[in-house]
Image: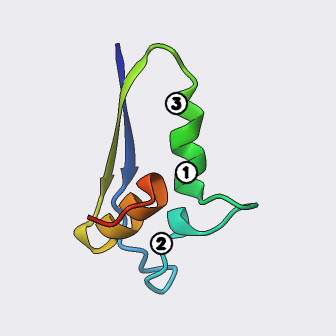
Amino acid sequence: MISVIIACGGNSTRMGGINKLLLDLDGMTVCERTVRSFCDIPDVGEIILTCSLEFKNAFLEKLTGEIP
């Protein structure tokens, strides 16, 4: 089993507080595209996404469609 760690923990200071991984790129966020690229690999057993607390709910909503 392979574990994938996707580091999304930046502060977005150069983007004026806008997390570039949550920006739309042809109908899907950059984060969604990154996660999906690993979902199709059979040996990947888990995907761990790290992010700051400030963006936690935004990432969860984009990746699961739910806000905790």
Residue sitting at the far right: 26
Q: Earlier in the sequence, mark 2 or mark 3?
A: 2
Query: Mark 2 or mark 1: which is in front?
Result: 1
Residue 11 in the image: above or below residue 60:
below
Residue sitting at the far bottom: 16
Secondary element at tag 2: loop
Which residue is at the front of the view, 9 or 65? 65
Q: CA distance from mark 1 to mark 3?
A: 10 Å
Which residue is at the front of the view, 64 or 1? 64
> Disc 3 marks which residue?
39
Amino acid residing under circle 1 = Glu
Classify 10 Å Cα crowding around label 3: few (below 14), some (14-19), many (20 and above).
Answer: some
Query: Mark 2 or mark 3: which is in front?
Result: 3
Residue 9 placement: quadrant: bottom left
Residue 16 in the image: above or below residue 19:
below
What colour scheme was applied to this rendering of the protein? rainbow
Could you tell me which residue is drawn at 71 percent across and 61 percent down? 27
Q: CA distance from mark 2 to mark 3?
A: 22 Å
> Disc 1 marks which residue?
32
* Side (left or right) of 16 relative to 5: right
Give how far across and how far down residue 23 sits, in percent: 59, 69
Amino acid residing under circle 2 = Asn
Give how far across and how far down residue 1 sits, in percent: 34, 13
Could you tell me which residue is drawn at 43 percent across and 83 percent down? 17
The answer to whether mark 2 and mark 1 are in CB contact below 8 A is no
Could you tell me which residue is drawn at 52 percent across and 30 percent down? 39
Give how far across and how far down residue 30 sits, in percent: 59, 56
> Disc 2 marks which residue?
19
Which residue is at the front of the view, 24 or 16? 24
Give how far across and how far down residue 16 sits, in percent: 48, 86
Q: Earlier in the sequence, mark 2 or mark 1?
A: 2
* Side (left or right) of 2 relative to 25: left
